[in-house]
């Protein structure tokens, strides 16, 4: 046996084994990043590449910047696990969309206000707030509210509301949810804008509450040149002293066994060529509004509202009961409610809309039941008006 050859062969195996161990050691070392760090957060938009964010809305696309981010395993926003495509990132960037469902301070005051990134090399955190959208004020349940009554404000993102104001007066907030605020009207009536102030922004109505100066027909001011409240139609006009009144006189149909008819004089209210002095403009920029109070479930019949402009009639049929929402229960209101109709929805017989609102010289409101008799109806209307959007 040649020990010299055995020695050389054994030495060769030892060297080879040592080299293999060294290679594996280097390979394992390359698999593990250093500890990750986060140095900046910016929007994905290239135009904002040099900006730095400390807060953003859920749903925003952002870039997390730092070091040793290439082996990212998890990203959390306020401890909410976010999905991402690691192929879009690099050692110094993570491109990610903040989850729309991630909790914000608006819904959980105890959120961490942090981004957390977990990689193979460890984890890093970064102070970052998830903000909420500014409040959106869609309108009021009723734009007329009696002194001491309840103002119902409708909209969205009503988070952390601090104040509700009528003009400069702070109102008592009775309740608040994400989509509705209820506040108490002062004991003394007022005409002014409603403003809501929250942690994430402010919103204000573009109309004044209880504004009786904007009207076409409100039964308190005549719409005839000879001083009559209406030109024709004998629908009942109820005194403003009635407990149901919202802002002076109003019209009410309260009747049983309403016959099947397309016209009934005691259900009609109309002007006759009256200068309403509305500002010029197309229908697309205006809304038709009025208050209505439907006491009993309404399941048949309609208010045909006719506007005459330049000698042409434009009609809208108001029948809110005619929808899947009220098909079984019927339509009722909780006291007075403001109806908001796009003026462009008033159509002529040819399907056209009003080209110039200033040409409107007549308003007729006619309740009718052409298709069937109605066992009972109790509905009131008031404050017909056309306003800017």
Image (cartoon, grey):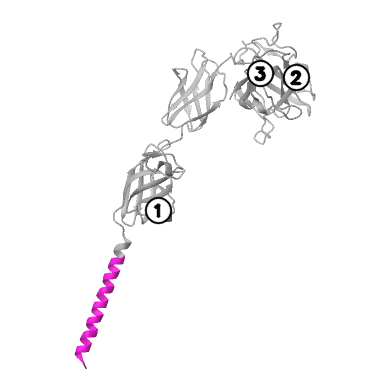
Q: Residue at x 24, y 81 (%)?
A: 12
Circles 3 and 2, Cβ within 8 Å, touching? The answer is: no
Q: Which residues are magenta?
A: 1-27
Earlier sequence position, callout 1 versus callout 3: 1
Q: Position of residue 296 (x, y in %)?
A: 67, 25
In the drawing, what numbered circle is on residue 247? none
- Can the viewer see residue 336? no
Circles 2 and 1, Cβ within 8 Å, touching? The answer is: no
Q: Position of residue 80 (x, y in %)?
A: 41, 46
The crowd level at tag 2 (other Cα within 10 Å; few <14, some 14-19, many 20+) is: few
User: Residue 377: which quarter of the image?
Assistant: top right
The crowd level at tag 3 (other Cα within 10 Å; few <14, some 14-19, many 20+) is: some
Which residue matches tag 2?
Answer: 311
Which residue matches tag 3?
Answer: 358
Circles 1 and 3, Cβ within 8 Å, touching? The answer is: no
Q: Nearer the viewer, residue 378 or 60?
A: 60
Q: Residue furthest bottom?
A: 1
Kindly report the distance in space between the C-alpha atoms of the residues bearing marks 2 and 1: 67 Å
């Amino acid at each position: 046996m040649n020990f010299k050859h055995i020695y050389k062969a054994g030495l060769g195996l030892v060297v080879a084994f040592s080299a293999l161990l060294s290679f594996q050691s280097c390979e394992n070392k390359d698999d593990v990043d250093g500890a990750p760090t986060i140095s900046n957060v910016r929007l994905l938009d290239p135009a904002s590449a040099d900006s730095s964010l400390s807060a953003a809305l859920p749903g925003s696309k952002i870039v997390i910047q730092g070091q040793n981010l290439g082996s990212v395993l998890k990203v959390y926003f306020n401890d909410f696990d976010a999905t991402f495509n690691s192929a879009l990132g690099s050692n110094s960037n993570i491109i990610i969309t903040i989850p729309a469902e991630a909790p914000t301070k608006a819904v959980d005051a105890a959120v961490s206000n942090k981004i957390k990134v977990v990689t193979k090399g460890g984890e890093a955190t970064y102070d970052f707030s998830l903000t909420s959208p500014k409040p959106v004020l869609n309108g009021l349940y009723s734009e007329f509210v009696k002194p001491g009554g309840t103002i119902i404000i409708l909209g969205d993102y009503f988070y952390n509301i601090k104040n509700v104001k009528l003009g400069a007066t702070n109102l008592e907030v009775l309740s608040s949810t994400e989509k509705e605020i209820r506040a108490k009207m002062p004991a003394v009536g007022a005409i002014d804008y409603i403003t809501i102030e929250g942690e994430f922004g402010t919103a204000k109505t573009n109309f004044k509450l209880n504004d009786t100066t904007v009207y076409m027909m409100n039964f308190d001011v005549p719409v005839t040149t000879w001083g009559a409240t209406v030109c024709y139609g004998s629908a009942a006009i109820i005194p403003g002293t009635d407990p149901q009144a919202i802002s002076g006189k109003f019209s009410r149909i309260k009747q049983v066994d309403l016959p099947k008819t397309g016209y009934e004089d005691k259900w009609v209210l109309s002007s006759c060529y009256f200068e309403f002095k509305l500002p010029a403009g197309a229908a697309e920029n205006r809304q038709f509004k009025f208050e209505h109070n439907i006491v009993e479930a309404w399941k048949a019949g309609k208010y045909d509202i006719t506007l005459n402009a330049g000698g042409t009639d434009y009609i809208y049929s108001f029948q809110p009961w005619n929808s899947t929402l009220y098909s079984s229960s019927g339509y009722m209101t909780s006291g007075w409610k403001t109806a908001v109709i796009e003026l462009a929805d008033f159509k002529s017989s040819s399907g056209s809309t009003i080209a110039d609102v200033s040409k409107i010289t007549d308003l007729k409101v006619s309740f009718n039941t052409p298709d069937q008799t109605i066992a009972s109806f109790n509905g009131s209307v008031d404050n017909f008006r056309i306003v800017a959007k």
